[in-house]
Image (cartoon, grey):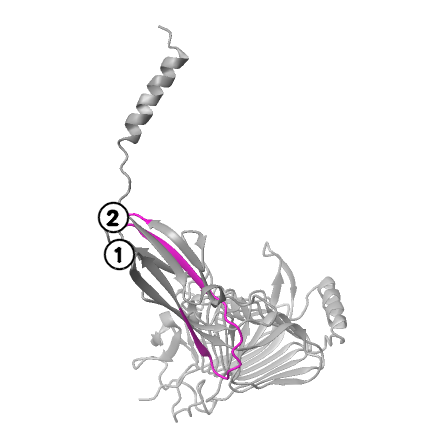
Amino acid sequence: MKISINNTIGILSILIFSFSSCIKTPEFSANSNLKFSKDTVYFDTIFTRKPGSTYPISVTKLVSIKNTENKWVKATLKLGGGKNSYYKFNVDGIAGPEVKDLEIGPKDSAFIFVQCALEANNQINPALILDSIMANVGTQQTKIILGAYGWDAHYIHDSIIASNSTWSDVNKPYVIIGNLYIPPNISLKWNEGIKVFASARTYIYNLGQLNISGTAENRVSVKGDKPVFNSQFLPNQWGGIYVPPGGKIVANFSDISNASIGIIARTPVTQDEKDALDAFASELGGSIDYSQKPEIVLNQTRIQYCGQACLLGLNAKIIGENCLFADAGSYSFLGYYGGSYSFNHCTFADYSYFGNRNEGHFGFTNTLRDGNGILLSTNDLSFTLNNSIIWGYKTEEINSDQMNSSLFLIDANNNLLKSKNDKNVFNKISNSFNSNPRFIDEDRGNYQLDTLSFAFEKANPSTSSAVDLTGKTRKIKPDLGAYERFE
């Protein structure tokens, strides 16, 4: 049987009419209160904008709006401040400051994404900036409050420190965008109480001298530029501090966190590396003195929550006393290819789980190997460790690689170590092994000692320091590690 075109059209017309007659027109509620998942969106503290820039902008907050009716609603959403608001939003992909006739089905939800970008307020302390998103269905209105503290800042954008300088403003933070360069023979001092924030991809290249001069009452902090988050969950926010030969850091009562590598003190290995570093130093108006190893002196300092390593030395000179190096993806400390390292009353710990590390987080070697583990060279290493704790979630937390073709001097006494000590690197008589130090809360990065800690009163008074990491005077019978515990 043949079907004509006219018959086909007639049949389709009947089907379409029949189908469309079955579709009901949505019934809309004229008045309805929408339900927000929260009544206030709070952004904590946000840096106000760098002049002439869109930097920085906040994180994005998510809010859902629920239609509790059994009918559809048509809602109009708008910012109270309109187009001049410091806030912006979009709802289901439609951008504000006003969205009209947004249709939300019965018992269904829509999603609002909110950000803010604050202008400078010229105030000493962070200033609260408020606005609201109003949702209207007919004559009914629902409102959500928006709030953020805007914090004016000193912005340092891809800068070279041209002369000896001091940062001392405790009321406004210093925000580094891009890289900061300290040339040879130039010093930069950070006075007590200042706060330094570094943006993504920021490195501090210290070819001169960086003096971090905090006090027990007013520490200096250096961290990533996202002050709204809990820092323990955000490694790799910035690069870290790089120190080549001739460069020096002296840090007292300071906190460095959220970098990829907190501090890396490194002597170039190959001629190509030296040539590149020489060219870099020349651009900064100086030269490299390779007779001087990169030098780091740390007192009462915390380096924590770093994506790769807290402290890394490659044929460097590092001294640390009353310091915490904790929670890194690979290493709390690595002394590589020789150098001179001395630590007293320090705590090295890792419970971060940032990385999939298979080895201990504390390492030192007098060797240089290629990617296949083949030995390339050795270098003299001198290592001293006293009254300290090395601990973590692995059975073996210490790595060492020793070749007798170069000096390998180890002087370690009165330490608590998480190690099977298979290579007998540490003296079993003068050190303690695998007795839990019982930190207060390692999951939250609190490495102070609990009341039942094995480390209590185990330090040697003759080699002990006068005060702990927080500046408290140690007892006559002092404790191991960076923190002193008092009854």
Does label 1 or label 2 sit earlier along the sequence?
1
Location of residue 21 with respect to 311 vertically, above or below: above
Do tag 1 and tag 2 residues touch (Cβ < 8 Å)?
yes
Position in image of residue 235 (x %, y %): 48, 66
Residue at the top extreme of this rendering: 1
- Residue at the image position 26 percent from the left and 37 percent from the top: 24
Position in image of residue 83 (x %, y %): 48, 63
Which span is picked out in magenta?
104-131
Location of residue 443 with respect to 211 vertically, above or below: above
**Residue 317 sits in which quadrant?**
bottom right
Q: Which amino acid does label 1 sit on?
A: Ser
Position in image of residue 484 (x %, y %): 39, 86
User: Which residue is more in the foreground, 238 or 305?
Assistant: 238
At label 1, counting other C-alpha atoms closer than 10 Å, the crowd grade (few under 14, some 14-19, many 20 or more) is: many
Quick check: is 238 in the magenta stretch?
A: no
- Residue at the image position 38 percent from the left and 18 percent from the top: 9
Name the secondary structure under disc 2.
loop
Q: Can residue 380 be seen in this view?
A: no
Quarter the N terminus occupies: top left
Name the secondary structure under disc 1.
loop
Q: Can residue 159 be seen in this view?
A: yes
- Residue position for label 1: 32
Quick check: is 121 in the magenta stretch?
A: yes
Residue at the left extreme of this rendering: 70
Position in image of residue 387 (x %, y %): 45, 82
- Residue position for label 2: 71
Q: How many marks?
A: 2
Location of residue 486 with respect to 79 vertically, above or below: below
> Taking 240 as reference, is 22 left or right?
left
Quarter the C terminus occupies: bottom left
At label 2, counting other C-alpha atoms closer than 10 Å, the crowd grade (few under 14, some 14-19, many 20 or more) is: some
